[in-house]
Image: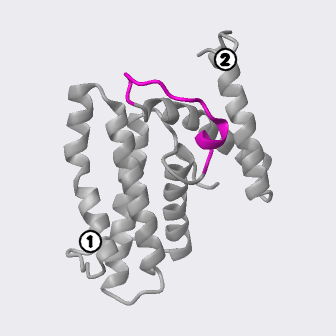
Amino acid sequence: MKTRSGENVPLRDLLDEAVQRARKIIEDKNPDLSESEKVDIAQKVGIGAVKYYDLSQYRMTDYIFSWDRMLSFQGNTAPYLQNAYVRIRSIFRKAGEEFVPPKTLSLTAPEEKNLATRLCQFGEVVPTVLNDFRPNILANYLYELADSFHAFYEACPVLKSEEPSRSSRLALCELTERVLAKGLELLGIKVPEKM
C-alpha cells in the first residue's frame, strides 16, 4: 500500500493504526467493558476491518482507502457484520436457556422468509468463491445476510414472541450466527462476543 505521496506503508503500521482507531470507537460506544475485553475487541474489529475492506473489493479494481468507511458500523464493513453476530449472541444471553431447535419452522413474516432464503444461499456461494478465487463474492453475500438479519431483527421480535414463532426465530438467529461466523472465518476474520 502506498500513500498519496508514493511512500510505502508497512502492513504492521497499518494494522496497529486500525486497532488503535477501533479501540477509540469501542471506548466511545461501550466504556464499561473491561480492559482485556477492549483489547480483544479492538484487535478483532481493527484487523478484521482491514482484511474485510481489502477482500470485499474485486481484485482487479482500485479502491480508495478510508478509515471512516472501513471502521463504520453501517454498510458493507466487517464491524457491521461483527455487530450482527454480537447482536445474535446477546439474544441468546438474554434468553438464558439452552436452545433446542424446533423440528419444523414457522415462517410467516416476509423478513423471516427473506432471512431463511438468504441462509440457504451459503452453500451455493462458497464453491463459487473457491472456483473463481473471488473472496469479494463471499464478502458481498455476508453483507446481504447481515442486512437481512438486521431487517428481520427490527421487524420480528424474537424473545417476546409467542410459540411457535419464538422457536423459529431463535432457529433463524442461530443459523445466521453460525453462517456469519463461518463466512468471516473463511475470510480470516474473527468475531467478538461483545462490542
- Labels 1 & 2 near each other (Cβ < 8 A): no
Which residue is located at x 47 percent, y 24 percent? Answer: 62
In the displayed image of the protein, which residue is found farthest to the front? 5
Name the N-terminal-most of marks 1 and 2. Answer: 2
Q: Quadrant of the N terminus?
A: top right
Which secondary structure class fits the magenta region best? loop
Helix, strand or loop at label 2? It is loop
Residue 54 on the magenta segment: no
The residue located at (50%, 75%) in the rendering is: 95
Instruction: Pinpoint residue 70: horizontal percent, then vertical percent.
Output: 59, 39
Magenta highlight range: 58-72
- Residue 72: give x, y in percent of width and height: 61, 48
Q: Is residue 35 shown left or right of residue 181?
A: right
Tag nearer the camera, 1 or 2: 2
In the image, residue 179 lies at what x, y percent?
Answer: 35, 51
User: Would you name the residue on which mark 2 appears?
Assistant: 3
Instruction: Give the residue type that dot 2 points to.
Output: Thr
Q: How is the image coloured?
A: one colour
Indicate left or right for 115 with 30 as reference.
left
Q: Say what secondary structure mark 1 lies in.
A: helix
Residue 73 marker: none
Which quarter of the figure has residue 152? bottom left
List the residue tagged with mark 1. 113
- Compared to 124, does 129 lie above or below? above
